[in-house]
Amino acid sequence: MTEAHTIDAAERVLMAATLRGLAEELEGTELTRALDAFGFADLLAESPRDAVSTLFTALGRAGSMSTSLQDVLLQPLAEYLPMATTECNIVVPGIGADQVGATDGEPLAVRGLVIGARPAPTYLAPVAIRGELAWIGLREASGISTRRVGGLDPALAMTEITGGDVTADVIVAGERAAAAWAAVATAGRLALGYQILGAVGQMIDLAVDHARSRVQFGRPIGSFQAVRNRLADAHVAREGAAAALASAWDADDAFLAGLLAKSLAGRAARIAATQCQQVLAGIGFTAEHPFHRFLARALVLDSILGSATELPTAIGAHLISAGTIPRLVDL
Amino acid sequence: MEVREFRAGVRAWIDEVAEPLVPAIEDQSVEAQLNHQRRVQRLLFDAGWMRWGWPAHIGGLGGSPILRAVLGEELTSRALVHTTSWSMHEVLGPAVAEFGRPDLVEDIFPLLLRGEEFWCQGFSEPDAGSDLGSMRTTARPRSDGWVINGEKLWTSWAHHATRCVVLARTGAPGSRGISAFLVDMDTPGVTASPLETMAGVDEFCSTSFVDVEVPPQRLLGELDAGWRVAQFILSCERGPIFWQRGAWLAHHLGLLLDTARDQASASALGEAYQLLWAFRATSKSTQDRIAAGDLPGPEASVDKIMIAAADQAVFDVARDLLRGDMETDDTARSRAWRREWAYSRAATIYGGTSEIQKDIVASRLLGLPRSA
């Protein structure tokens, strides 16, 4: 993840303000069109760190969604796949699953999710075939069905792809396929990590505003230590995840750093959801208050590409097989 | 001196010197720990490594303070020195260098760097822990200097220390009437009585001061401005000390990797490591800010909360994965683990409790109203 172009501080501020504005005002296809006009794809190619951190934090803050996650997931694939990847969608494993499908021969059953789908009805999915990773191409004719997911967060444009016995058009298999999956998963984990932290930031801000203005027993509730400690815990969890995300771009083991950043972001989501909801109390439980939208967004994204309960096992296994505790970044 | 070059040099030196740097595991007494550190510090001083990151006029060779963090990391990540005693010169050194009278500092600082002197920190009192501003130790002016009376608590290594940075009341009640002094521990009236920790280590003391006469040049900073010295010292703890403690924790986590037997062990190791990484990633930007000349502000309270949580997580995992060794085994190795686990219980207490840190986060970083 090298940066071909270094963006200076003034450009970065301007870019962040523009992307935040777009993410706040627009949603869905309109947002996608506006991001295309802004040149997000070029920015992603030139300076992935700036592009991903800025846009996905803004999406998390605004509670909006675009097809940009597909841009991020497809970008590392160009290096591995012998095909134009701009007109398709990446299927990520269903919640709790390692891959989109696995088979020891015929048939191949698939179940996965597309987040922020592009209109193109073609898909790329990582599956395990006889224990070996492969990327397969899928389309309607392959025997899949698609379902627009309502679920916990209906506003998140998510599509479920399922198929009991699909025709697998293998595009690449073996080591290259595994390396491609590692790169795609890492890119996705960082993007989702930023988006989660955007939503976490909103949860904390809403709870802090409430704690400053809500008066009980003649005092703002934010002066009670029990309330203060809850919000401090959420802030500390957020800061740890933010630092892990920022450091992931410089880490010497990008895959491990991606696992860590996503796991810590999911952990921050869970802590903020619990602590901020308790501080917001009754009002935060209503449909009218915006809190629940950020809670749902953060918790659903926590579950994608490995949750805060699943990833520590993967992280520990990585350490055990490496036989060492990596420093990842140095002073 | 570049950081990379420095790190490579320290590593090569450690490999070359090798055996004399490795502490004996059988004798885990404070005396043995400090004697070993004296030898290591002397070797490092003579080779120059100990002097980098400190200004030339006090015995250093100049360069960024980051170099001190790197040295600490390379030593503690190999457990060549113990992280707690290695913190001592980092806790008090920068403050004495900053606030001490220049001629005094020039005389004594090289002794600290060479390991010929250990210094201790006389802050807490029996009735002034988190509420440090309520301290009762007094320093009253006399014809030539000051007379200190009072009792300090939790003064680590006071019974092995040559000097002590003492906070004492010189003015009005509260934090504004406090001054800082550098007191020689062999001054008549100073008595350090060791207290045993739950780990069975007599690391800290109750230290009493009875009519202790202190010459005027031992005032650190301005009169009644001791709170600034205290704040400076507390913020110094967030620098190289935290960085090398993180490395010490990583070393201990690494010792557990071959004890993992199942998925639950992997998950527990992963959890502890991610907390440690959250700390390291956060601390890196704090170290960078310190190197740029900033004194860590309220945001360093976040670092403190994080490292305390990681510290306890690492040794909690150790107790689980060592499967009873910590509870029932009496080999030197298990005694060392037991001692580290016990010490980690204090991580959320010393240097400002986690509750105080969270209060700072709530007020200063989140903007919540202070308690009535």
Image (spheres, coloured by chain):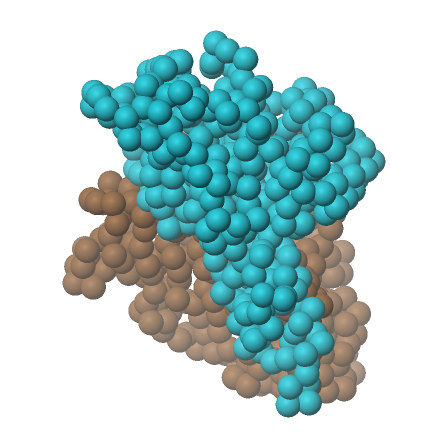
Chain colours: A cyan, B brown
Q: Residue furthest bottom?
A: A217
What is the quadrant of the C terminus of chain A in the image? top right
What is the quadrant of the N terminus of chain A in the image? top right
Between A13 and A67, which is closer to the camera in this rendering? A67
Q: Quadrant of residue A215?
A: bottom right
- Which residue: 67% across, 24% down? A41
- Which residue: 77% across, 72% down? B225
Between A128 and B291, which is closer to the camera in this rendering? A128
Left or right: residue A146 compared with residue A163:
right
Left or right: residue B278 compared with residue A325:
right
Between A327 and A240, which is closer to the camera in this rendering? A240
Between B211 and A291, which is closer to the camera in this rendering? A291
- Residue B188 is at least partly visible in this image: no
- Residue B257 is at least partly visible in this image: yes
- Which residue: 70% across, 22% down? A42
Q: Is residue A19 above or below residue B309?
A: above
Q: Position of residue B114 (x, y in %)?
A: 54, 47
Q: Position of residue B219 (x, y in %)?
A: 73, 70
Q: Position of residue A155 (x, y in %)?
A: 57, 48
Q: Position of residue A288 (x, y in %)?
A: 63, 66
Q: Is residue B268 above or below residue B19?
A: below
- Which residue: 56% across, 61% down? A292
Q: Is residue B7 above or below residue B195?
A: above
Count of labels in the image:
0
Left or right: residue B191 compared with residue B321:
right
